[in-house]
Amino acid sequence: MFISTNWLRRHVDLDGVDFHELGLRFTMSVAELEGVHTVGANLATVVVGHVQDVQPIEGKRIRLTTVDTGPHGVRQIVCGAPNVAKDQHVLVALPGTTLGDITIAEAKVGGIASAGMICSESELGLSDEHAGIKVLDEAATPGTPITELWDVADVLFEIDNKSLTHRPDLWGHRGIAREIGALLDRPLKAMAHADVVFTDDAPLTITVDDQDACPRYTATCMSGVQVAPSPMWLRLLLHRVGTRPISNIVDATNFVMLDLGNPLHAFDARELSGSAIVVRRATDRESFTTLDGQEHVLSSDDLLIADATRGVALAGVMGGENSEIRDDTTDIVLEAANFAAAMVRTTAQRHGIRTESSTRFEKSLDPELVEDAARSFIGLVLSLCPDAKVTSRLMDVRKAAAEPTVIELDVAYVEAAIGEPLGEDKIVGILEGLSFGVVRGENGALTVSVPTWRATKDVGIPADLVEEVGRVFGYDNITPRGPQIALERPDRNAVKRFEARARDFLSYSCGLDELQTYSFDSDPLLARIGVQYDARTTLAQPLSAEMPGMRRSLVPNLLGVLEKNFRQFGEIGVYELGRVFHPAQTPAKDTLPEQPKLAGLLIADAQLTDDPDATLFFRAKNIIVGLCGAIERPKITLEKGGVDPVWAHPARQARILLGEQVIGCIAQVHPSTLAALRVHHGAVVAELDLDALRAATEVPTAYTPLPKFPAVFRDFAVVVASDVSAARVRDAIVGADNELISEVSFQSIYTGEGIDEGEKSLAWSVTLRHVD
């Protein structure tokens, strides 16, 4: 949205203002500006010229003109416009004038010397009209600069609409001027056209069926209007802010909307039948054609402005093609109304119509603004059409006005919240500058009356007034100070600390990468690896059709990571801490699934050559055992067998036990699962219940002094039956002398030449040290 400073001058004195500095203050105090643009400053060397003669140039479409430019002399100018004629008063850009990317210079055009350029409105940036040169309606003295005819030099503030969504009062120039007046400490000028005289006649009956959807509807009749192009000052202002001029009556409605913020609509009175206006809900499947020629099928959710027989406007959105202003219109009916924001927004979205009118109404406009907008339009039309007159009273149907919003405010509260000793006079001055009514009480007590245009979901509590004072005073003027707050030590989150210790061990000590996968299962992945669940928690609105259910295990997603990454990385070590979702044992409508927190890990290494499957299995086992020590929990044991999922190897697998409780499993990935994932090397996965580990009795780490005496290291191997676990062998070694043997570490397993069938060789490293 563009705001013209020339337009703002109609409401507030801007003499001597640095607009770029004002733009910075506006951004800090009101809304962020996208830019401050200077336009028309290049037109100082454009002057009025009188065309004395026009001569055709043989064989060419251009013509040679003789133009009197007053003190700048009589000039020969080549012109290609079809409408140039003798005795016209035109606008001439003298040599040296810059128009867009072109600088006018004395040059030859078609072999003929030309000393200037006769311009169209488009070339001068006055409008989009480019069909011919600009011909002045009234004679003007040759040589008169264009800057003396109209205010062509302007500064535009560009504001992103999103910055004003919460401020319906800022969707017109007067609202912006009110804010700027408060920033500059300059008064707002009185409303123009407030002295319009109405008659006592009421030629129309107005009926509003739904006053919640239309809190206020006014209509005024006028006769004697003459539809014609608007004067240049009006067309120029509209063009500057991006609105295309159409005709004086339509331009007047747009001008008032852009000036005060309240949209208007003018009907051709000839097209309203039955001397009635009815604001009603549309009937289902009712057809209506809007001004843009588009036909819409309405429903009872749409509000329609109708005459006695048919709809003539879609309330708050767009008028109807059947009642638009035409070139021969002489009598009009002005609609100035207020419509419910939600109703306008849903109607505009449903029919795909986005207009300047709907954009404003959906922000919750002030119903009290309606009469000001009507008076402003009527006054403007009376000045544009000398023969026009008002032929009715302001016919007004409205819902009872809301009670005024009054807020009790304490000066000390404002100063404490802002952090500056502003003083009562400063606070009152800022609020009154923003048009708040303020009554002073004793000891800094203020009674503040909120103006109606700020009481539409904007200002309603003392904190809102603190914001008003703070932003106008300037947040950048508040002295930065550190907070003086007594902080208490927060409660220790045992769960977070427990999980952090687990992460530290798995990431830093084991070198694994942490994952965070979706909490949903991928059905195509489950199908490839052959996993089927008898029951699971499904989603009413899944993110994807391929992920309709919550995961019951971390392993499928880990295998999915293996599938995606193993072709790029020959070695993978990953883990995830996350919840799984088991359907409740006694399902009911409002019963939540059980959601235990698990730890899952997967390791794979294509570089291993010496019995890689066994090496990976024991590497994973060591990680799990080490994890229990890192989180200071009792040692776990492994019990072979009992792991059912289809992805688990039938022989190389074990359940993880904490005492007698099964808290997880570890297994080599089944070869058929690896084949389904197109992975050609072995992998091991493990999963254990973190909640069960956290609930176990803590075993604090015992710290002892560093030993004084050196240790003796011995490595040896022992041959045992295949079904003897390494844990049993380790316990036997430690039991030989638990004072002398300080550490026992498993090294490797061997089967093959030299070892009988049904046996295996386990290699160990033993550290011997005695304290004395």
Image (cartoon, grey):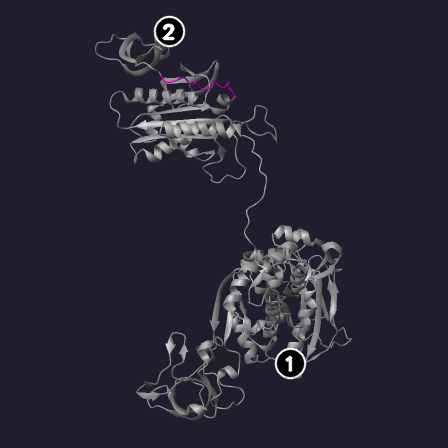
* Residue 528 x/y as whole percent: 38, 30
Please name the amino acid that badge 1 sits on: Ser
The 10 Å Cα crowd at callout 1, few under 14, some 14 to 19, many 20 or more, is few
Q: Which residues are magenta?
A: 695-706
Residue 735, labelled with which disc? 2
* Residue 67 x/y as whole percent: 42, 91
The 10 Å Cα crowd at callout 2, few under 14, some 14 to 19, many 20 or more, is few
| Tag 2 secondary structure | helix
In which quadrant of the rendered view does residue 342 lie?
bottom right
Residue nearer the viewer, 213 or 476: 476
Please name the amino acid that badge 2 sits on: Gly
Query: Which numbered disc, 2 or 1, marks the residue closer to the eye?
Result: 2
The residue that label 1 is drawn on is 383
Between the residue at mark 2 and the residue at mark 1, the CA separation in whole angstroms equals 111 Å
Q: Main secondary structure of the magenta part?
A: loop
Residue 130 in sight in this render: no
Answer above or below: position of 19 versus 641: below
* Residue 453 x/y as whole percent: 67, 62
Looking at the rendered image, the quarter that the C terminus falls into is top left
Left or right of 656: which side holds 416? right
Left or right of 280: which side holds 554? left
Residue nearer the viewer, 9 or 386: 9
* Residue 625 x/y as whole percent: 40, 19
